Amino acid sequence: MRVGVVRFPGSCDDVDALLAAERVGQTELLWHKDRDLHGVDAVIVPGGFSYGDYLRAGAIARFAPVMEEVVEFAAAGGLVLGICNGFQVLCEAGLLPGALLRNTSLKFVFRQVDLDVVDHDTPFTREAPDRLSIPVKHTTGRYYTPEPVRVVLRYATNHNPNGSQDDIAGVCNEAGNVFGLMPHPEHAVDPLTGSTDGLAIFESIKAHVGDLVQA
Amino acid sequence: MAAAHRGLLSRRVVMRARVLVRPKAGILDPQGQAVERALPALGFTGASQVHVGRVIELDVEDEAQLPDMCERLLVNPLIEDYEIQRL
Amino acid sequence: MSVTSSRHRELGLTDSEYELILEGLGREPRDVELAMLSLMWSEHCAYKHSKRLLRRLPTEGRHVLVGPGENAGAVDVGGGLAVAFKVESHNHPSAVEPFQGAATGVGGILRDVFAVGARPIAVLDSLRFGDVTQSARSRYLLEHAVAGIGHYGNSIGVPTVGGEIYFEPSYEQNCLINAMCVGLAPRERLIRSAAAGPGNVLVLLGALTGRDGIGGASVLASAELGEGDADKRPSVQIGDPFAEKKLLECCLELLDRGLLVSLQDLGAAGLTSSASEMASKGEVGLDIDVSSVPLREADMEPFEIMVSESQERMLCVVEPERVGAVLEVCEHWETLATPIGQVTTSGRFRILKRGEVVGDLPVGLLVDDCPLYDLEPAAPEAPLYPGTPPVLASQATPAEVLLTLLASPNLASRRPVFEQYDPVVQSRTVRRPEQADAAVLALPDGSAIAVSIDGNGRRVACEPRAGAFEVVLECAANLACVGAEPLGLTNCLNFGNPEKPHVAWQLKEAVEGLSEACESLDVPVVGGNVSLYNESPDGPILPSPVVGMVGKLPDASRAGRLGFAREGDVIALVGPFQPAHTGSELAKLQGQAPAGRLPFKDVPAILDAQEKVRSMIRSQALQNAHDIAEGGIAVALAECCLAGGLGARVALPEGLDPFGEDLGTGFVVSGDPEALGDFPVIGRVEGKRLEIDGLLDVSVDKLQSAHSGGLDALLR
């Protein structure tokens, strides 16, 4: 199973995403300028501050050459996971509905939060329990959408760190192959550094890809 | 006369534009609210309906491109409204 | 030759310094030369009043790979790895513009670390402000400095893993922003800054050069802040963490590929100080053509280009045949790279403009010939610092005292601050803020490094030598609590005007105290920083040495924790703890001025206690370890309850002052009765209340609301 992690200028948690994905398969770094996904089974658009968050978070990254490939890959049913800044990029690129706005507190927030998994029927949550403890770290994580959306994760009661609509923490597209979330599962995979609940998301991807290969 | 005519043809028309970007009405604008709260604390009364946005200024050769530039990059039409001004 | 003009005075040079310049040059200096000299001879760059004194600090140690004098010091942590680290101040710029001042302070210290070839893996910060309960200005500075630190560190992907914040009226006009960075490198990638190889090319990397900070060093850092400071605003540098992220990755790749002869960051006094220091260390000369420097503003004069403090720039020396490869790597990382000059044998620093010489100075005149001044220390005859209005009634019960202390700005939970920082990026963080007394970062081989930053003003004001000694002890104690052995230390000395005898005395005594402590603990100083002239018309700030210490522990999974862990564990008090009321937080809340002698330190017993705590944390005999700091043992016990979510029932030794302080000497630990054997047991972990026999009985919930509410209310 091969997972590609995109790196834009300014990506920070690309390294962490690579480390986490290495626990379930092989990894490939996808440089923003390359129009080549190297045949990976899943693409992660990671957290950080691509292009300095200039103009709007994710607004410039969505036009990177590699993103053209990612859009095609998604249209063909490929698995795309957008974490934090990655979620922002996917919304800007139109791969997911809605947008991320500034936290109501107006401040950056780091916090370990509890999440309710409300949709287990996705390639990213099929192996996940009902509740996950995962850290968030962002200034612009308040999810907003005027249209209906497939909600996958919600912040547990009193755990919403940013004022997002309906406590939404993660959503996917109708087909379920593109998933964006503000919390950072790649920072919850190692007992040495915190909770390991995030591993379930990577295990789910691995299980899904495994099924596809067998089918 | 001929010299002036030649001058007109050789000069490229560059327009300076300003794009005002505002948060869409109806979406919570915590920055605007924070500013609205801060003003009375400094002794300014009577300010309300405060919203905080962004200004982008640029020289363009073809002003017909501006709406497209806004829709595709400068603005997120889902959450922002915009206004183009010629300077 | 005589001193006829007064241009030099406007730039901060004394008449006698100008005489020396005239002698050294053999003529009147040209504009660009005078600007460069005024900055290189400023206190901030030349350490005129402190250099001689700093020679006292011990700098040798078996783990030291790079000692003081380079961009950052470095120690060997085993496994072929080195850890580079340094702390630096950005006090004056932050008082003028706290967001950008603090942000660029972080940016600057990050560059110092990757300039020696290490990848920044952690930031810590030590902040000091005025009384936030009284001063809206201090609240403003706190809020914006924290936002600035978060903005820069978070954006560049370096975790902020620890720090400290203190509030004292003394810092009202002179806030202190000290930023520390820790970096990791394979030993072979460490690089020095000496320029070498005549004919080699000087390449400028990074951002465009603009008018940021022109005159910053001499204007701000070498003079006391006065009335008209709003117009110093344009001098403040603006930081761009995105540019620095690209610059960082670019530099590390250039080093990995062995493409550089030397590397130096551009900080205070910009190109002038970087280039001249590179030349001085390498005993070479340099030619720089300012017309090749890429500019943000078209019409800059040579002197402006030479002293600009535009951020996110580095200078490197490259062999001519490698310049092409360097430019390619820089292009990949979208980092501007421009050859601007070359190394020569002349021993002179020449500034050219389109080939024409506009400045020509001996390198030595810039770097080595600045006069050093001896301090004239004299102990103050009268107390320097007043008490503050009491906030505690004299009849307050011990329970009320404890709750007031826990809610006080110096002791309350810093969660509202550290939640604005990302502590986990890069996936190394084993202990986050409030989980343990030091930050712990995992290394690839399963071991870990621990880092703490500690300072003190109040107790150093009481007795500078003993107070500074305590600061080092406390820092080492914090490392012991997670099981780490100290490897090296960096320090920032924040003091008032050293030309005043009582401040000179404070400085001299504090340096002596720091040195004695380093010698006792066998911990060398590998680098540091001095910030002087922190004074206002009301007088000098509290003398505030800040120490950052890095240590190592063999097993990351056994790093110690702060909180009580299990019902039934016994609690012990370890160490020659001799608490006293003098200089304590309680004394301050009662309105007492900082004055009086601090408790005597039994060094062998302290070392023994630290070693015991360290080894018992490593062997997992202890469930928690927490050093007793401000607020005394009562506060320390409360903090252990709060971190663990468990109560305790304790009886203190006869006569022990529950709120008295003796920093760096006492630990609260818990564990199995058998494991704790020899230690004096004082109680047990149990229930949901903190009961100290004969003194107080408070629910953990009540402790929690006092502790968590303290700073929150002030930051809204």
Image: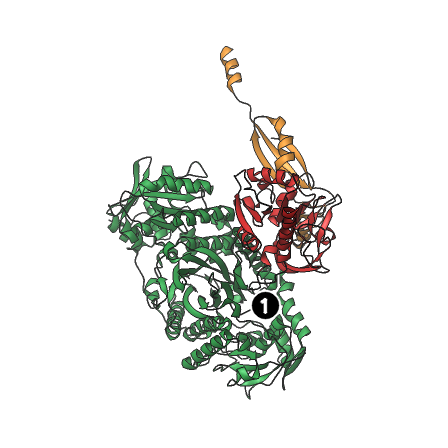
Chain colours: A red, B orange, C green
Q: Relative to A185, say whether C558 is above or below.
A: below
Q: Residue furthest top?
A: B2
In front of the other: A17 or C239: A17
Q: Position of residue A96 (x, y in %)?
A: 68, 43
**Numbered marks: total:** 1
Quarter of the rendering occupied by the C terminus of chain C: bottom right
Q: Tell which subunit mark 1 falls on.
A: C
- Asked whether residue C558 is in view, the answer is yes
Q: Position of residue A169 (x, y in %)?
A: 68, 53
Q: Residue furthest bottom?
A: C654
| Lateral position of residue A175 relative to residue A8, left or right | right
Badge 1 amino acid: Pro
Query: Which corner quadrant of the image does residue C411 belong to?
Result: bottom right
In front of the other: C331 or C376: C331
Q: Position of residue C22 (x, y in %)?
A: 26, 49
SS of the residue at dot 1? loop
In front of the other: A104 or C645: C645
Q: Residue furthest front?
A: A214
- Asked whether residue C7 is in view, the answer is no
Q: Residue shown at 57%/81% (left/top)?
A: C672
Within 10 angstroms of label 1, few (less than 14), some, or many (20 or more) residues? many
- Residue picked out by circle 1: C409
